[in-house]
Image (cartoon, rainbow, N blue to C red):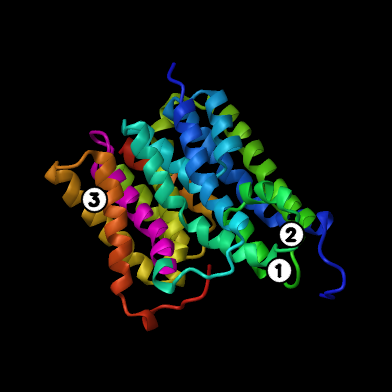
Amino acid sequence: MPDNHPPGLRQGAADGFPIVVGYFPVAMAFGLLAKTTGVTFADACLFSLVVFAGASQFMALDLIKAGIATADIILATFLLNLRHLMMSAALAVRLREVRRGLLPFIAFGVTDESFSVAALKAGKLTAPYMLALNGVAYAAWFGGTVAGYLVGAVLPAAIQSSLGIGLYALFAAILVPEIKKRPVALLVALLAGLAYLLLSRLGLLSSGWSLIAAIIAAAAAGLFVRQDEEREGDA
Amino acid sequence: MTTYLPLILGMLLVTYLPRLFPLLTLSQRRLPPYLRRFLAYIPYAALGALIIRGIADSAAGLAPATLAGVTVAAAASFCGGGLVSSVIAAIVAAYIALSL
């Protein structure tokens, strides 16, 4: 890749194509599950247009179904999205020459996937490149949500229970590749599950707070794993 | 019909601010390593807690099917299956488990 020609709109859209292919079906799953959770079409669209965060949106559906309080869902989302701090911080260094007025728009589209693509891109990052990369991903996320919701509306009720289970299957399918990359992920995930069971059965905290406390405790416990047992550096 | 507007706006805030803040402050400093690891571990912890909660607290009669679905998805994903194909396999497994 020659460095004298910084990547622009076209390159951003091209590099975003794999994300589009990945996002569309997952967003369809969100639309479908939103429908089976009883979320209106307008709200499902708003989730994808306004929040634009896959794991958080799926978690929200699950917690809505469980009747968790709105404030607790928001707090759990906050925890889950704190990781974007380090992604944006890593991008900030490479976006120093971008006009400040454009940064809020670029920031909105920072996701695990767009970050991975941008972080691996050699050379300078430009505003048109970032906006195109994030833009095509955003369009796919919204388009998939609409398509999934419409499919959900015509599906027979008989398979709605198995579709609800698909949510937990999705969580597992997101987690397992991470475990293969970083075995400590399995330990942290198991600890969080056990901590949640313990806390929720004790009954001292609400279900939402049990979840939040379990997440913090398990992520902190993961810090005690010797660092040379894992590969640092990604993200 | 319930509207989730307050939830959606709250989620917008807590999702957007961590994306925006480092870009605006243009912090050159990298976060300290232990903090970066803690932040990286949060999604693993959240997914683990959500999965186990999903199995343990599922509605009456759904627990075996949920366990079957999660197991199939994990196995498919472990064997290199993509997100969507793993989930579809799991939904089929759950459907079979429910009709047994």
Q: Are marks 3 and 2 in contact (CB under 8 Å)?
A: no
Place of residue B30 in the rendered image (x, y in percent of width and height, measured from the top left): 52, 70
Place of residue A68 in the rendered image (x, y in percent of width and height, measured from the top left): 31, 34
Task: Identify the secondary structure beneath mark 1.
Answer: loop
What type is the residue that disc 3 sits on? Tyr
Residue B67 lies in the magenta-colored region = no
Circle 1: is it few (<14), some (14-19), or many (20+) Cα within 10 Å? few
Find disc 2 in the rendering and name its residue.
Answer: A15
Name which quarter of the figure residue A44 lies in: top right
- CA separation in Å, label 1 and label 3: 39 Å
Q: Are marks 2 and 1 in contact (CB under 8 Å)?
A: yes
Instruction: Tell which subunit mark 3 falls on.
Output: A
Q: Quadrant of the N terminus of chain B?
A: top left
Tell me what residue is drawn at x 47 percent, y 48 percent: A55
Find disc 1 in the rendering and name its residue.
Answer: A121
Which badge, 1 or 3, comes first in the chain's sequence?
A: 1
In the image, taking residue A135 as reference, residue A60 lies left or right, namely left
- CA separation in Å, label 3 and label 2: 39 Å
Q: Which residues are magenta?
A: B36-63
Q: Are marks 3 and 2 on the same chain?
A: yes
Name which quarter of the figure residue A7 lies in: bottom right
Task: Identify the secondary structure beneath mark 3.
Answer: helix
- CA separation in Å, label 2 and label 1: 9 Å
Q: Number of callouts in the render?
A: 3
